[in-house]
Amino acid sequence: MVDPINQFDRSNDYKKDFPILKREVRPGVPIVYLDSAATSQKPESVIAAMEVYYRQLNANIHRGVHTLAEEATAAYEGARERITNFIGARDTRELIFTRNTTESINLVTQTWGRSTLKTGDLVILTEMEHHSNLVPWQMLAAEKGLRLEFIPVNDDGYLDLDVYQQLLKLEPKVVAFMHMSNVLGTINPAREIIRMAKNAGAITLLDAAQSIPHFTVDVNEVDADFIAFSAHKMLGPTGIGALWGKRTILENMPPFLGGGDMIKKVFLRSFSANDLPHKFEAGTPAIAEAIGFGAAVDYLVSAGMDRILQHEQRLVTYALEKLKRIHGLHVLGPDSVSAKGGVISFTLEDIHPHDIAQILDSEGIAVRAGHHCAMPLHERFKITVSTRASFYLYNDEEDIDHLIKGLEKVQQIFR
C-alpha cells in the first residue's frame, strides 16, 4: 500500500501541503484560513490516503478472508494503532472509533452514566464547556435526577479552582471538563483537576477536541478515565473521532449501539457483546475516514507536536500585539500566551460579529462569528456572540497581517 505521507517534504513551510490554501475566493483574493478551531484543513497526504483506500482497497472489514478485505482491515486497524500510540496509550482495545467528540461523550453518558449513576448523584462541569460536553449531561440529569454543578470562570478566563475544591467536598461521581477552551483559548490544568477529582473518588472525562491537535496529550500523564477527541480538528476527515477509556471501565460498560460487529453471538431473544473495542463499534464503520485519521496522525508526528505548539504560541504572541492597534477591540480570555492555545475571540466596539466576519470574508479571511457552541460562557461575559480567529501549523504572520488590515477596513466602513 502507498504511504502518502512520504511523498511530501517535511520543511517548515506547511502551507504547500494543503491544497485548499492555494484557492482564491475570487481572482486575486487568496484564502486566509483562520477557523481551525471549527475544523482544520487537510494535507495532501490525508486526501491521498483516503483515495488509496477507495481506489485500491475498497472492501468491508473484519468479515472477509479475501485479499481486499484483509488489506482494508489491516489499514483500518493500523490507523487505530497509530492513533493509540499518538496519545501515549498502550492498548489498542482502549481506543474506540466514534463519529466525533460529541458522540464519544454521548457514548459515556448513555452507557457508563446511565448504568452507573443514580438519583441525586453529582456531576461537576465548568462554565466554559462546549455544548457537546454540557447537553449530554443535562439530558442524563433530566432522565436520572442527577445534580449538576459548575466550576466558575473568572474575569481573566481561568477556572476558579478554589470553588472547585469546595465542590469536591460534595462527593461528585463525575468531573467532566474541556482541556482547552474553543472560545477563550484557556488551557486548563488537566492533570491537577483530574488528580483532585480522583482524590474525591470521581470518574473523570476530558474533552480534548481542542488540545490533542495542538500539543502533546499523554493519557498516562493526565490520567483521565475517558478522553474524547475528533479527527477533523487535527488535519483528519470529518465523520470520525475517538474515545479513549481505561480498559477496566470500558469492559464493564454496556454496549452503546446494537447491530453488526458489536456482537459475539446472537440468538432470537438475546445476544452476547463482542470484545473491546468492537463492542462499541456497531455496523460498518467509517473505514476511509479512519485511514485518513491515521494519515493525519502521521503528519502531526512528522511535524512534531512541540514545534506545532511553539509555532502557535509565536503566532498568538504576534496577533495579540497587533490587535492592540485596533481601537475598541477587546480580547476574551487569558493574556498569558503560556496558558493560551491558538484561539483568539474578541468583540469590537458596537459592531456585530456577523458583520465583521462578512467584511473579512470579502477580503478572503475566514473567521468564525457566533457563540461557538458555548452559549453559557458568552452569557458569563455578558455578551451573546463574539468573533473568533484560530490558528494552526499552516498559518503564519502574514495571515495575521491580513486579519489586522481586514479589521481596519471593518472600522473604516462602520466609522
Image (tube, rainbow, N blue to C red):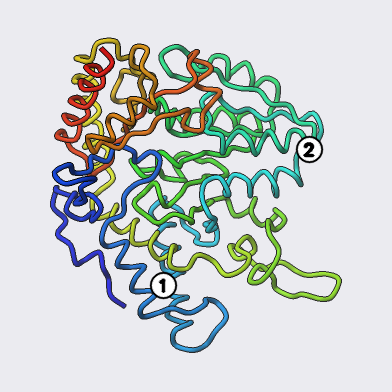
Would you call the spot at circle 2 few (<14 residues within 10 Å), some (14-19), or many (20 or more)? few
Image coords of residue 224 (percent x, y): 53, 40
Return the mark for residue 143.
Answer: 2
In this rendering, the answer to whether 150 lies above or below 243 is above
The front one of 202 and 318 is 318
Q: Is residue 188 left or right of residue 140?
A: left
Which residue in the structure is indicated by mark 1?
75
Is any part of residue 314 visible from this angle?
A: no
In this rendering, the answer to whether 8 lies above or below 355 is below
The front one of 19 and 263 is 19
Give me the residue at 57% from left, 70% from top: 284
In this rendering, the answer to whether 7 lies above or below 315 is below
Give me the residue at 71% from left, 37% from top: 139
Query: Which residue is outermost to the right?
Result: 269
Q: Amino acid at mark 1?
A: Ala
Q: CA distance from mark 1 to mark 2?
A: 40 Å
Give me the residue at 21% from left, 31% from top: 315
Q: Quadrant of residue 412?
A: top left
Ranked by sequence position, the earlier of labels 1 and 2 is: 1
Give me the residue at 63% from left, 60% from top: 280
Closer to the camera: disc 1 or disc 2?
A: 2
Q: Do the residues under discs 1 and 2 have CB atoms within 8 angstroms?
A: no
For the image, the number of numbered tags is: 2
